[in-house]
Image (cartoon, rainbow, N blue to C red):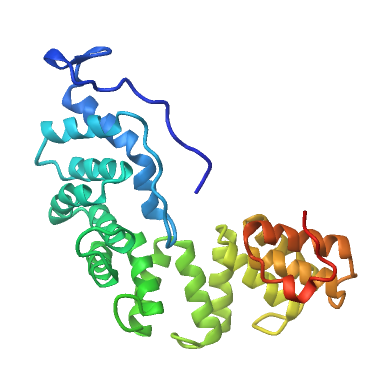
Amino acid sequence: MPADRRMPGPCRLLLCTAALCCFGALPARADARADCQRLTAPVLAIERVDPGYEVEELAEGTLEICAEAARQAPDDPRLALFHGLALLGNDRPQDALIPLMASAEAGDSSAAFFIALIYASSDVEGAGPEQALEWYEKAAEMGHMGAQAFLGFYYDQGIGAGANDEQATFWLEKAAAQGHAGSMYILGLRYADGEGAPKDEAKGLALIEQAASLGVPQATYSLGYAYLTGDQFVEQDVPRGLALLEEAAGLGSELAMVELGRVYLDGELATRDETKGKDWFCLADRYGAGMHQELYGEVLVCE
C-alpha cells in the first residue's frame, strides 16, 4: 500500500447534549453524506487493486459521521456502502456485513465486492473461499472490474471451486477489457504458454507488455527474464533484459533482485561484478527473499 494517506481528523462528532459539538449542530444530510463518502474513499480504493489488500486506517470520527448519515437516509444504498466501509475500516467486519448486504441487495456492485473480501480475508461467521467465490461472482456479474479479476484468479488457482480454465479466461478477459493490469498479466502468461487458453505468443507478449507499462512488477520481471535468456517468446536481448529487471526491482520484485544478483555474480550474461551482485542479493534479503544463501553463501555477507 502507498505510504500513510490518512487525512487530518475532522471535528469529532461527540456525544453531547442537543447533538451539538465543535461547530454546533450536526451536518445536514448532504454534508454528512459528502463527508462520509470522502472519508471512506481510502477503503473504497481497494476495489481497484490486485488480489491482496489492506484496509487503510480511517480519519478519526469517520464512523460517527457515516453512522449519522446512514440514519438520516436509511434507504440510500450508496450511503449503506459508505457506512459498511467505515465499519470495515474500524476493524468491525461482522458489523460491516449488515449495511453492505443491504447495499448489495439494492444492486451496488462495490458492496458485493467488499462482502466477498470480508468472507475471503476475515474470520466472520461463514467466512471461507466458497462464500467469497459466490459474492465475487455476484459482483462480477454486475460488471465490477475488481471482482471479475478476483473471480478469474480464483478459477485460475482453483480457490473456492475446482480450477476452471474456461471460466478463468472469461473473467480475466472481462477485467482486462476494463483496464485491470493484473488480469492482463495473467492472461498474457496463459496465451504465451498456451496453458488455459489457445497458444498465441504475440497476443500473450502484447498483454504482458501492457501490464508492465501499467506498473505490474511481475509482468516487468517476466519480460526482463524473457529478454535476458531468450528462452521464451522473444529473442535474446541482454541489455534490455537487465534494464527491465532493474525496473522490476525498483517496483519491489524480489525475483528481479535475486536474478540481477545471480547475473552479476555468475558473470555469464554480464561482466562479473561481485559488488553489484552482492548489493542486489542483500536488497532481496531485506525484502525477505532469502532464497540465495545456499548458492552464494561464500561471497554474500549482508550487514
- Vertical placement of residue 230 versus 99, above or below: below
- Vertical placement of residue 238 versus 70, above or below: below
Residue closer to the observer: 29 or 53 = 53
The quadrant where residue 49 appears: bottom left
17 left or right of 117 in image: left
In the rendered image, residue 261, in percent from the top left (x then y), is placed at 77, 67
In the rendered image, residue 251, in percent from the top left (x then y), is placed at 62, 56
Residue name at image x 32 percent, y 84 percent: 162
56 left or right of 68 in image: right
Residue closer to the observer: 276 or 303 = 303
The quadrant where residue 80 appears: top left
Number of disc labels:
0
11 left or right of 67 in image: right
Residue name at image x 76 percent, y 67 percent: 260
Res 237 visible: no
The quadrant where residue 41 appears: top left
Residue closer to the observer: 47 or 4 = 4
Residue name at image x 42 percent, y 55 percent: 53
Residue closer to the observer: 31 or 131 = 131
Res 289 visible: yes
- Vertical placement of residue 291 versus 53, above or below: below
In the rendered image, residue 170, in percent from the top left (x then y), is placed at 35, 77
In the rendered image, residue 65, in percent from the top left (x then y), is placed at 24, 29
